[in-house]
Each structure stands twice: as C-alpha cells, then as structure tokens.
Image: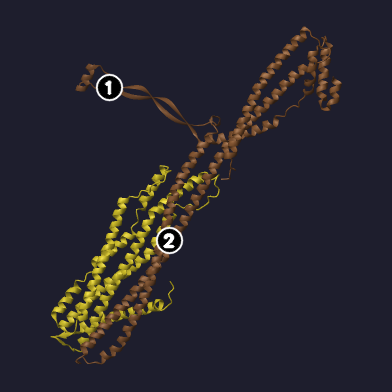
Amino acid sequence: MTDHNRAESGSLMNADEKLDSIISKYGAQSRPAASTAYRHLATPYSRTVQSDSFKAESLQKVVDEIKVIEDGIKAIIASRTKKIVEEKVPVQKQRPAEYNAFDKMLVSVGLKKQQMETYTDYEIVRKELPRNPDEVLVGEFRSMIEDYIRSLKGLNEGLRETVIEVDSIVKNLTQVSDSFTDQIHSDRRAYDAQIKYSKEIETQLREIIPIHENMSPIHERYAEVEKIRDHLEMALRESQGMELKYKTNIDMGVKYQSALKSYRTLIHDFKERGDIHVNMVDKFAEGASHMKIAVDNVSQICSGVAKVTQSMIMIVESIDDGNRVLGRYAALIGDQISSSPQWEMEYSALKEAEVAYHKNEEVRLKQIEDNRQEIEKLATRGTEKLLPPSAA
Amino acid sequence: MDNEIIGQLSETINNFNINQFVSDVDRCIQAWNAPDSDKKTDEKLSFFKKLGFSRKPRFPLDKEKDGILRSAQNDIAEAIERESDAICSRAALLLKYLGEFRFVRNGHPESDEKILPYFRKIKQQQQTLVSEISDETEMIRNIIMQSEQMRNLVKSHSERLQQTAFMLGIIQERLARRSSAMPVLLLPSDKNEIKNTHQAYHDDLFKDSCNEIEQRKQKIIAGVRELKDGWNLLEKLLKKGCGRSMRKKLDMLMNRHDLRVSEFQKQVAECRERYGFTAAEF
C-alpha cells in the first residue's frame, strides 16, 4: 500500500513517512486480524492526510493595524468629549422644626418662636469627568461630527445671508455713485451755460457803462439808463454768484464721489472675504462628512476583517481536527489490523471522534457562511457609501 | 429823500438776523463730531461673545435710541434748510428794495456831486454784501445737505456690516481652533477693520466740509456786520450830509468794498479757467 502511494504522489512524502512510523509503532504491538470492511477505507484517507501549516500571522498583522486605527479614533473622541456623572451629595439644610398642634398655635399667635433645625438632604450634582478611550464607541464619532457640522453649517448660513446683504450694499453704493456722476455732469453743463449768460451780460454792460458815465444826471433818460445799468450789474453779480455755486457743487460732488468709490471698494473686499469664508466652511463641512463616512468604513472594515479572521481560524481548526481524525484512521490501516477489544475500543472512539468532527464541522460551516454573508453585506454597503476621504 | 423807503430799508437791514441759522449750523457740526454710540456697540458685542453665540444673532441695536438720535439729526437738518431759505428770501427782498432805492428828493433826482458817488457806491456795497450773504448761506446749506445724505447712507449700512464682521469673526475663530485641519485660513482678521475705515472715511471727508462751512459762516457773520455798518453810514450821510469824519469812514468802507469786489472777480475768473472751458472729464 505504501509503495503504491509513494509512486503516485511525490508531494505526499512526509505523510507517508509519518504513516509508516505510526504503522510500525502499532505493528510492534499485537496485530489484530484485518477485516475487509476496514481495508477499503484506507485508500481515500491515506491520500488526503496532508496539509501545510496555515500562516495566520499576516492576517493577524492586518487586524492589529486596524485595531491601532480604531484605538486612535477612540482616543480622539475621548479627548474631545466628557462624560457627565450624576452624584448624590449630602448637603446641610435648614427647615422649620415640627411642632405639635398646641405649639403651632402658640407660634401663629406669636408667643413661641419658630425654631429652625438642620437636616441632611441629598442633592444630585452633575460632574463632568474626562473619559477613557476604552469607554468610547467608534460610532460616537459619527454623532460628534454631525453635531459639529450642523453647528458650523448653521453659522455659515447666517454668514451667507449677511454676505448677501453686504452685496446689496455694494450695489446700492454703485447706484449712488452713478447718480453722483449724473449730478456732476448736469452741474457742469449748467455751469457752462451760466458762464455764457454772464459773458453776455458783461458785453451789454461794457456798452452801457460808458453811456451812463458820459450822461449828465439831468438828461431826461438818465434815470432810465442808470436803472438799466444797475439792473445789469445786479444780474451780472447774480449770474457770477450762480457760477461759484455750481463750481462749489461740482467740487463737492467730485470729492464725495471719490470717497464713496473707495468706501465701496472696501465694502466689496469685505464681501469677497465673507464669500471666501462661506466657501471654506462649506468645503470644510464637506470634508468633515467625508471623514465621517471614512471612519464608518474603517469600523466596518475592522469588523469585516475580524470576521474573516475568525472564519479562517475556524477553517484551520477544522482542518486540524480533520487531520487528527484521519491520522488516527490511518494508524489503524494495515493487514495486521485485526478485530480485538483494543481495536474495537479504538474504532468506536474513532467513530465518535468522526461524528463529533462532522457535528463541529456543520456548526463551523454554518458560522463561516454567516460570516461570509455579513462580509458581503458590509462590502455592498461599503461600495455604496464609499467615497475617497478627501484631504479637508 | 423818501423817508418811508429809508425807514423800510432800515427796518429790514437792522432786523436782518442770521443768528438762528448760525446756531443751527454749529449744532449740526457738533452732532457730526460727537462720537457715535460706538462704545455701547462694543459692549454689546463682547456680551454676545461671552454667551458663546452660535446661532445667527439678530444684531440688536438700541433701535429706539438710535431712532431718536436720527430724528434729532433730521430736525437740525430741516431747521437749517428752513433758515437758509428764509435768509435767502429776505436777502432777495432786500435786494429788490435796494434796487428801487434811488437818490431822489421830493420825486426829483438829486445831483449832489459829493453825495451821489458815495450813495451809488454804498448802494453797491450793500447789494454786493446781501448777494454774498445769500450765496454763502445757500452754499453752506448745500454742503450740509450733501453731507447729511452721505452720513445717513453710511449709517444705514453700518448695522449690516457690523453684523457681518461679527459673524465672520466667530467663524474665523472656530476654524482657527481646528487650524490643523484648515491650514489655508491665513486671511487678515481685523475685526475692527470696518469700524476703523468708517472712522477714516468720516474724519477725512467731514473735516474738510466742516472747515469749509466754518469759513463761509465767518464770511456771513462779517458780511452782516458790515452790511449794518454800511447802512448806518448811509443813513447818517443822507440825514446829516458829508462831514470829514464821515468821509474817512466812508473811504474805509469803500476800500473794503473794492477789495471784496476784486477778490470776487478773481475767484470767478479762476473758476472759469479751471472748469469752464475744459473738456468734460467726467
């Protein structure tokens, strides 16, 4: 039998040697007569009693790494939150003493003074204590971040609205500046017109003044001429006064408009800064929600990997168990195996072991199947929500 | 000489009163230079910060008090408008009277060689002064109205801007706390920036305007004084004739008048040169 096997598969060398040593060990003892029933069990098992030692260390390393990440997250959460503990604290208080009916009447009348007595009351005091990372659940990270994002977003909405209002201020200032420009233009046109008018009057005056100077006061038209001259002089003074007024208005308009423009620039910059802040906070909130998803994924991966490890360990155990059973079977293989009470005992023990193995195997398979399904569920959920955690 | 007209003119000139106007203008400038309720606003800001305000705060200005302040300011502005209009209309009336004021005696034109030139000159002086007073008053009124508009505009924005600055400050603070996550937030964070530039804007612009108003106001006050002096001299001249002391005073008055007229003409020419015929730059 052994020669035949050796020839068949060279890789089964170790197993056959092991087999040989086991058989020789038993061969040294009493060899019971082989029964045909057991003989043909030998072939299938002897071929498959082989397994490499499973290297589970690498997987363990991954699990350790993930545990480190989880611990880190827990530490962060623990450092940023506090737990609130309520304690009953004894406190001394005063209350009026209890009197019987007679004494109470005396007190109400005023003959007896109401005494106060101290008693011990218990007050519930809330204390804030720092937390241990161990007390933290990774899931808390989600609610922590959600709270933070919510408050930030609320504030940001407020800022956004006020920035919009500032924008309307900028628009309003632009309107005012434009109306200034219009005003300045019309003033300048009016100023030019006024100057023209003044010059006309000046020309007329230049004509009439020599006439008036050279006229004698008793001339019949002297009064008329004087009146005209006076009137023209008044008109000229008035017109020139208007010129100066227009000029002052133009000056003022120009001055105020330039001040307004620089003021508007300032407000505009301010509004831009507000916009930048609003956008930044939006991005920050986005990044924070990505982080939330990433941490979710991490914890899912952690549990997934743990389950995988567990399954694989179970598989290894199953193989080990199986190996043990098969080894014992192989030990009983051989022509010299005969039915003896020892053999019967061994065989029934083996049968029991095999039954136990099958039962465990069922349980283990079931568990492995459960793990696999859960991992698949996590995986599909993960791929749905999985977003690359952006550097916020 | 028609005593009625003289009496009328005398009354008008002697009652030409600008005191109300001047005091209103002074009040207005005082109100401008008064520090705003800025200190109160600061206190309110810090109070809300202590509360750790995390929701959008409705920035609570003391609306009632501000409303009162604002309406007081409006009152002053309205008063100035009224007064300046009154002064201008009085001045116009006076000009009309002066225009009709002729050197006549009993209906015939006088030809007293000594008095006539003085009469004409003083009449001119009076007219010039009245015009000047009227013009300056109007200009002061325009400056004040314009400045008031500006001030109201800026004030109407200040609440919103302060609110925005407040919220911006809060967010910056929050983000700076988690600066490890947001290294980009290196924008300048001067919370008082808006307020400081407000002040600068106010100070520069309004100081200029205040100086100008002050100058013109002084001109008006001097002008009224001179107007009354001139009229008194004229009255005496007409009633008592032309004595030597009278002549000295008259000559002084005339010199001042001539100076004023030449100043005026120079100013008009300057302005025409700078603004009148240059191409429109705006």
Q: Which mark is residue A263?
A: 2
Residue ID at (27%, 78%): B128
Q: Tag 2: Cα neighbours inside 10 Å, few (<14), some, or many (≥20)?
A: some
Task: Inspect the image, locate mark 1, and give the three-letter code of the amino acid beneath it.
Answer: Gln
Q: Is residue A330 visible?
A: no
Q: In terms of image quadrants, where is residue A65? A: top right
Q: Tag 1: Cα neighbours inside 10 Å, few (<14), some, or many (≥20)?
A: few
**Tags 2 and 1 in contact by the CB under 8 Å rule?**
no
Q: Earlier in the sequence, mark 2 or mark 1?
A: 1
Between the C-alphas of marks 2 and 1, the distance is 73 Å
Q: Which chain is yellow?
A: B
Task: Residue A168 in the image: state x and y as whole percent.
Answer: 41, 57
Q: Secondary structure at mark 2?
A: helix
Q: Is residue A13 above or below residue B154?
A: above
| Of the pair A340 and A200, the residue shown nearer to us | A340
Q: Which callout, 2 or 1, points to the residue nearer the camera?
A: 2
Q: Which chain is brown?
A: A
> What coloring was used for the rendering?
by chain
Q: Chain of mark 1?
A: A
Residue ID at (28%, 88%): A209
User: On the same chain: label 2 and label 1?
Assistant: yes
Task: Inspect the image, locate mark 2, and give the three-letter code of the amino acid beneath it.
Answer: Tyr
Task: Residue A18 in the image: state x and y as whole percent.
Answer: 81, 20
Q: Is residue A195 visible?
A: yes
Tag 1 residue: A115
Q: Secondary structure at mark 1?
A: loop
Residue ID at (70%, 30%): A57
Q: Is residue B273 left or right of residue B243?
A: right
